[in-house]
Image: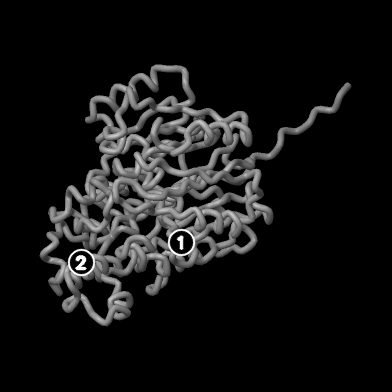
């Protein structure tokens, strides 16, 4: 009689979504050329408290799906050190420099780093490379603060390798231009690095040399990496990052027809490296590229909850745009791999040019290897929400950014959150 084999132990590796908490300086200064939503809302009054609470509600929705949830913290704002390097201060700076020093754009954690999970790397560790964000002044000073958070959250050197930034001039904007397909999160996969050139006069944010350097630093085999050019048409239409026109999860690539410069070549290369890949392509005839970008259909979290029903977490704007709402109805009614759509309200983030996918960085890891102060449950989110309710400004108009009273409120609000979470004051 043959021996009965025991089932293989479950992998401790799970996908964790680390969301950036929207900072108390959240404002609409229109600092990001090529980001149509950011430009459209430049000069509007922002609502930092509502923005941060919307972000927490999205995290609660992830927890309700059974997902593991993490956080990154708002960075110190204004960035006095950056202002000092420019020989100025908050009151003396020109308005565009002051706005850059006060930007809360680090809330978009998809730009924090590029992540290669342990199953893909030669040394069996999860590698993270902090993004340099050099193409935009308001983001270029984020990486030192972000690197400190990464090195604290992922300090276990047996499990993680945290790398500094790629040097200028090679622009790197992190996971917003990186996708990973794998049979499951805990298995080896194929990593897709999407780079741009230009489009319609807008700058491309991701340089191919930055992507190649990250693949080398992460010790990826050539069999595990693809370098794919983003469509200039997509960049010109407002897809400043790849995650505005494509997203991947498990073996599934969900993409717009006009996302890539050489669509056919990319799909053939992907299938050659991973025959089981499933490509769900949205034709331009069904959803115009402009509608996809306006609604942020692809700037969604594509996730696999414990119940196995692959879920697309979309901004509420997708349900308000006729073409995307109709497409999502057909998607769920069909027989494809995406079985559920969950709309979330992140309007304050959307108005500044970032949807649900922008707000999170995906890390495949064993939660036990991560500093627990960066992981959250419902109770912890309640505590964070109470701090935000008490300390975050209700609204900010751009002309108030030089107000010393507002600056003091912003700095005290962040300090209150850091203290509440028991993190070092200089994080």
Q: Using the image, determine if residue 14 lies above or below residue 210.
A: above
Q: Quadrant of residue 217?
A: bottom right
Give x and y (percent) for residue 181: 55, 38
Left or right for 316, reference 250:
left
Give x and y (percent) for residue 34: 28, 50
Upstream in sequence: badge 2 or badge 1: 2
The residue singled out by tag 2 in the image is 96
Question: Is the C terminus in the top left, top right, bottom left or bottom right quadrant?
Answer: bottom left
Q: Residues within 10 Å of mark 1 (few under 14, many from 20)?
A: many
Which residue does the image show at 19% across and 58% down from the upper left?
29
In front of the other: 303 or 102:
102
Q: CA distance from mark 2 to mark 1?
A: 24 Å
Which residue does the image show at 24% across and 46% down from the upper left?
36
Q: Residue furthest top?
A: 334
Left or right for 168, reference 392:
right
Give x and y (percent) for residue 23: 28, 60
- Please indicate, yes or no, whether residue 400 appears anywhere in the rendered image: yes
Q: Residues within 10 Å of mark 2 (few under 14, many from 20)?
A: some
In front of the other: 282 or 247:
282
Q: Using the image, determine if residue 87 lies above or below residue 366.
A: below
Which residue does the image show at 42% across and 49% down from the upper left?
196
- Mark 1 element type: loop
Left or right for 14, reference 131:
right
Which is more foreground, mark 2 or mark 1?
1
Which residue does the image show at 38% across and 47% down from the upper left?
241
Say the numbered circle drawn on residue 357.
none
The residue singled out by tag 1 in the image is 170
In front of the other: 311 or 418:
311
Give x and y (percent) for residue 86: 29, 78
């Amino acid at each position: 009689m043959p021996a009965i084999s025991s089932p293989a132990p479950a992998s401790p590796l799970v996908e964790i979504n680390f969301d950036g908490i929207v900072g108390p300086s959240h404002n609409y200064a229109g600092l990001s050329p090529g980001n149509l939503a950011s430009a459209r809302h430049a000069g509007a009054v922002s609502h930092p408290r509502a923005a941060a609470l919307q972000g927490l509600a999205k995290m609660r929705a992830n927890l309700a799906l059974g997902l593991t949830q993490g956080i990154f913290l708002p960075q110190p704002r204004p960035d006095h050190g950056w202002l000092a390097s420019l020989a100025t201060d908050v009151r003396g700076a020109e308005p565009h420099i002051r706005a850059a020093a006060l930007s809360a754009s680090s809330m978009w954690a998809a730009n924090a780093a590029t992540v290669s999970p342990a199953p893909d790397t030669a040394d069996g560790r999860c590698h993270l490379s902090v993004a340099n964000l050099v193409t935009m002044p308001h983001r270029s000073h984020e990486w030192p603060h972000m690197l400190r958070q990464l090195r604290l959250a992922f300090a276990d050197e047996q499990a993680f390798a945290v790398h500094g930034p790629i040097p200028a001039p090679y622009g790197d904007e992190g996971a917003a231009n990186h996708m990973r397909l794998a049979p499951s999160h805990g298995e080896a996969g194929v990593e897709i690095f999407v780079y741009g050139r230009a489009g319609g006069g807008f700058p491309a944010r991701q340089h191919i040399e930055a992507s190649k350097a990250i693949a080398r630093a992460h010790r990826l085999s050539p069999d595990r990496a693809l370098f794919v050019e983003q469509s200039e048409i997509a960049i010109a239409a407002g897809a400043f990052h790849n995650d505005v026109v494509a997203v991947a999860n498990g073996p599934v690539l969900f993409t717009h027809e006009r996302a890539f410069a050489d669509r056919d070549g990319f799909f053939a290369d992907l299938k050659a490296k991973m025959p089981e890949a499933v490509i769900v392509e949205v034709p331009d005839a069904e959803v115009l590229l402009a509608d996809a970008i306006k609604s942020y259909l692809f700037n969604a979290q594509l996730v696999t909850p414990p119940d196995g029903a692959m879920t697309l977490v979309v901004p509420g704007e997708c349900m308000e745009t006729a073409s995307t709402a109709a497409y999502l109805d057909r998607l769920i009614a069909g027989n494809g791999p995406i079985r559920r759509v969950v709309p979330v309200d992140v309007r304050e983030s959307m108005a500044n040019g970032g949807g649900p996918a922008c707000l999170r960085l995906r890390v495949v890891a064993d939660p036990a290897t991560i500093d627990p102060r960066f992981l959250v449950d419902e109770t912890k989110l309640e505590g964070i929400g109470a701090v935000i309710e008490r300390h975050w400004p209700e609204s900010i108009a751009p002309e108030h950014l030089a107000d010393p009273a507002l600056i003091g409120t912003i700095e005290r609000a962040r300090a209150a959150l850091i203290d509440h979470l028991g993190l070092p004051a200089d994080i």
